[in-house]
Image (cartoon, helix red, strand yellow):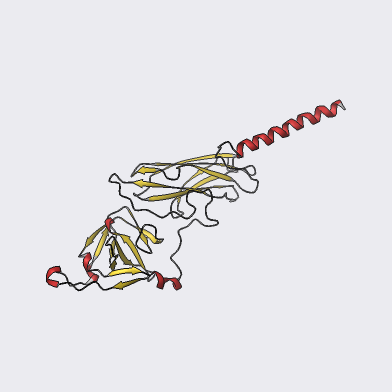
């Protein structure tokens, strides 16, 4: 009997200690480390924090911690706005480590809002749920052109199965997104000195990265990959407030770009007004 008690009592204390350790780790202590599960790795993105601001050309530290109670974490991957891989941190053991910390220094290409995400992978390709954070890069003059984060930006979960850039809307929705061109009021040609021909108005992109959106406004969806410095575009319309300009897209639809990031050749006042319906 005494021998049996000597065996049972230590086992009871060990079980209690394990339960308390699990409780401390995952509840009420402010510990941001991921909750362990046997079916997949877990990850938490510790930096950057959502809402932070960085100066243009300053490096941003991406820091994530991943753990796995099963096969182990083989690598951590960091992604940018459009799901493009920024960098990978691999474990010292190709089969994976129980804990893996990933630290990457990344310099965002322009002054705008960004969201970055991180995922952990086992050696067999089993991936964790994603984690993401949004932050803002500001030029010295304070100007920005925001990229709209996804609806869950700043929360722990990434959209399931895909973190790629969304494709343009289906063809059946293009009619709703194509602008309706309205002819501008008749002007006195002697005053304007122009013929009113919109085909002659072009622009050169001056920003490092310029988003093309489906409507005029920083909260409109992205229509295609962004333009970069030096690209030339044809302007076919303008917004009523004169801040945004419409450009033709290869899909047959129309995109919108922000006028302050353009060097315009020609008179933008001759462009017809365009509205999205």
Quarter assignment of residue 266: bottom left
Residue farthest along the left direction in this orientation? 190
Which residue corresponds to the image point at 64% horizontal and 37% vertical from the top-left?
23
* Displayed quadrant of residue 236: bottom left
Residue 122 drawn at (x, y percent): 59, 47
Q: Nearer the viewer, residue 39 or 219?
A: 219
Farthest-out residue, top = 2
113 vs 194, left or right, is right
199 lies above or below 42? below
Could you tell whether 69 is left or right of 149 in the image?
right
**In the rendered image of this protein, does residue 108 appear above or below residue 230?**
above
Residue 251, given in percent of the width and then of the height, sits at 39, 69
253 vs 155, left or right, is left
**Image x and y of residue 271, in percent:** 24, 68
Vertical relation: 157 (above or below) 17: below
Question: Which quarter of the figure is the C terminus placed in?
Answer: bottom left
Q: Position of residue 221 (x, y in %)?
A: 41, 61
Q: Is residue 59 left or right of residue 192?
A: right
* Mark count: 0
């Amino acid at each position: 009997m005494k021998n049996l008690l000597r065996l049972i009592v230590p086992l009871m204390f060990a079980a209690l200690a394990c339960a308390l350790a699990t409780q401390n780790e995952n509840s009420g202590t402010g510990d941001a480390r991921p909750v362990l599960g046997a079916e997949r790795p877990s990850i938490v993105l510790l930096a950057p924090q959502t809402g932070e601001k960085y100066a243009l050309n300053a490096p941003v530290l991406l820091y994530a911690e991943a753990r796995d109670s099963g096969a182990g974490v083989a690598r951590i991957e960091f992604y940018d706005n459009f799901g493009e891989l920024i960098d990978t941190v691999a474990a010292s053991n190709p089969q994976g480590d129980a804990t893996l910390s990933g630290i990457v220094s990344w310099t965002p290409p322009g002054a705008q809002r960004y969201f970055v995400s991180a995922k952990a992978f086992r050696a067999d390709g089993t991936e964790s749920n994603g984690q993401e954070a949004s932050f803002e890069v500001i030029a010295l003059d304070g100007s920005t052109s925001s990229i709209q984060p996804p609806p869950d930006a700043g929360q722990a979960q990434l959209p399931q199965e895909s973190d790629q850039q969304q494709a343009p809307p289906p063809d059946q929705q293009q009619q709703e997104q194509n602008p309706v061109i309205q002819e501008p009021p008749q002007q006195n040609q002697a005053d304007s000195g122009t013929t009113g021909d919109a085909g002659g108005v072009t622009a050169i992109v001056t920003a490092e990265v310029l988003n093309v959106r489906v409507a005029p406004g920083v909260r409109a969806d992205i229509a295609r990959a962004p333009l970069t410095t030096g690209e030339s575009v044809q302007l076919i319309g303008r917004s009523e407030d004169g801040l945004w300009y419409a450009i033709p897209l290869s899909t047959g639809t129309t995109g919108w770009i922000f006028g302050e990031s353009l060097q315009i050749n020609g008179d933008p006042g001759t462009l017809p007004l365009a509205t999205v319906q």
